[in-house]
Image (cartoon, helix red, strand yellow):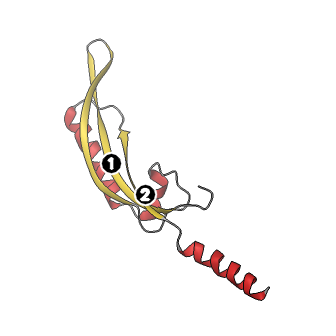
Amino acid sequence: MKKVILLATALMASSAVFATVNTRNSETTIKTEAFDTQEQAYNAGHDLMDEFKAMRNNELIKELPIHENNVQHPSVKVVDSNVKVEAFSKQRGVVQYRAIVEVDYQYKYRESRNS
């Protein structure tokens, strides 16, 4: 009986060791507010892009759409980003611009036993 209990305990402990760690590559798009000129929109987009690049792991987890619960620290990182400017108009004759920042990011997470 002791051997069975010991074997069961060893198997349970070793299953945690073999839990799978996955890497997820993802992307998100963030739009800025409206600006009167393309230059202002590009500047705002680059400022936002610089903010993301400077963020620490725990800040990125809060700001990026990460849906896994078991994210490994510090694995979240911005891989790439770029800025596009979009012209739009809400009223005839008035054109405004907004920056669209595309952020590619990566993180590692451990699969839960329930999945």
Determine whether the residue tagged by mark 2 lies in a helix, strand or loop: helix
Residue displayed at 26% across by 21% down: 95
Name the residue tied to disc 1.
Answer: 103
Q: Position of residue 70 (x, y in %)?
A: 54, 62
- Return the residue found at the far top: 92
Disc 1: CA contacts within 10 A as few (<14), some (14-19) or many (>=20): many
Residue displayed at 21% across by 33% down: 38
Determine whether the residue tagged by mark 1 lies in a helix, strand or loop: strand
What amino acid is found at the position of numbered circle 1 in the picture?
Val
Q: Position of residue 63 (x, y in %)?
A: 45, 52
Mark 2 or mark 1: whose residue is earlier in sequence? 2
Q: How many marks?
A: 2
Q: Horizontal placement of 74 versus 91: left or right?
A: right
Say whether marks 2 and 1 touch (CB < 8 Å). no
Q: Position of residue 71 (x, y in %)?
A: 50, 62
Residue displayed at 26% across by 37% down: 41
Point out which mark residue 60 bears. 2
What amino acid is found at the position of numbered circle 2 in the picture?
Leu
Residue displayed at 43% across by 68% down: 74
